[in-house]
Amino acid sequence: MKTDLTSGNPTTALVTGASMGIGLELARVLASHGHNLILVARHRDTLEAVAGNLEGKHGISAAVIPADLSHVDAPAQLYDSITADGLKVDFLINNAGFGLGGEFSDTDVDRELDMIQLNVSALTHLTKLFLPAMLKRKSGRIMNVASTAAFQPGPLMAVYYATKAYVLSFSEAIAEELRDTGVTVTALCPGATATQFAETAQVSNSRLFTRLGVANAEQVAAYAYSAMMRGERVAIPGMRDRVMLQAERIAPRALVTRMVRLAQENR
């Protein structure tokens, strides 16, 4: 098993949104490298199946905590449950999140407020709760899952893009605050990836997912793990996405926004 640098004890990673998509693949990568896991998502049965598989395959320990982090009090309850069980979180993987497509004037405000709570508030709250112990140990890694959406406005997914811009900005800021503390922060910024995200967000027919190609979630997770372990502040899987984002830096903002709209429109 992997051990931390200060105590020699096995390291434990808390992964939110661990039952599917990138979160599930991150859990698999972490387990394959010998890290114990605390798996969080809404449905206990799915989590227990994942935990049993990973324990059997990799010989690690995987605790399961069902929680809906779109509820305001859920992050504090999760923290209390983990500390009450005497568990130590060495790696915090803030992966849970979702999107919603459509014109802002037409979309469901309650769904968008839940999105802000999950993508922004819960991520911030969990980071606030688990960071002090990492600082005390002078050891820890935080990964906040943002998106390539974080780098520009997103017509037809306006709120989602804005939440990911927050995640990127927040992560880069605290990464600098934590410089030389032994704690690192990595913002993972994947592009379109083959998961359940597009269907949930009602954008599976957009040009972004039908014409521009999608990444493999397993490869994204492998890249993300390596970047986190290197302490990279911003991790963008895929050369194409890195090149496109560099091009956007010099393009007029209005043009970039228009191009994003075209990508988000149905084919």
Image (cartoon, rainbow, N blue to C red):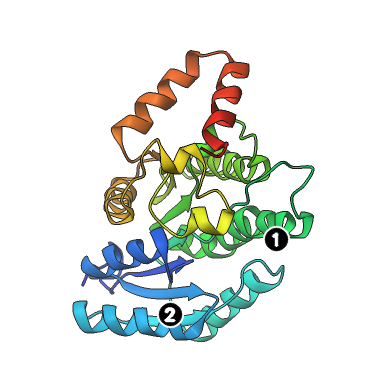
Query: From this viewpoint, which residue is outermost toward the front?
Result: 267
Question: Which residue is tagged 2?
Answer: 47
Q: Classify residue 60 by image quadrant.
A: bottom left
Q: Position of residue 256 (x, y in %)?
A: 55, 21
Question: Which residue is tagged 1?
Answer: 114
Identify the residue shown where x is 54% and y is 85%.
84
Q: Classify residue 5 by image quadrant.
A: bottom left
The answer, for residue 217, to whether it is visible in the render is: yes
Kind of residue indicated by mark 2: Leu
Q: Where is residue 148 in the image (x, y as percent from the top left)?
A: 47, 38
Give the CA distance from mark 2 to mark 1: 22 Å
In this rendered view, identify the residue nearer to me: 196 or 123: 196
Q: In this view, does 129 lie to the left or right of 18?
A: right
Q: In this view, does 54 lie to the left or right of 204?
A: left
In this rendered view, identify the residue nearer to me: 56 or 88: 56
Identify the residue shown where x is 31% and y is 37%.
238
SS for tag 2?
Answer: helix
Identify the residue shown where x is 31% and y is 85%.
52
Q: In the rendered structure, which disc, 2 or 1, sits on the residue that comes first in sequence? A: 2
In this rendered view, identify the residue nearer to me: 7 or 265: 265
Q: Is residue 257 above or below residue 8?
A: above
Q: Where is residue 197 in the image (x, y as percent from the top left)?
A: 49, 56
Q: Is the N terminus in the top left, top right, bottom left or bottom right quadrant?
A: bottom left
Q: Is residue 187 left or right of residue 203?
A: left
Q: In this view, does 58 lie above or below 97?
A: below
Kind of residue indicated by mark 1: Asp
The local crowd at label 2, few if under 14, some if 14 to 19, many if 20 or more residues have their Cα within 10 Å, is many
* Residue 208: mark in rendering: none
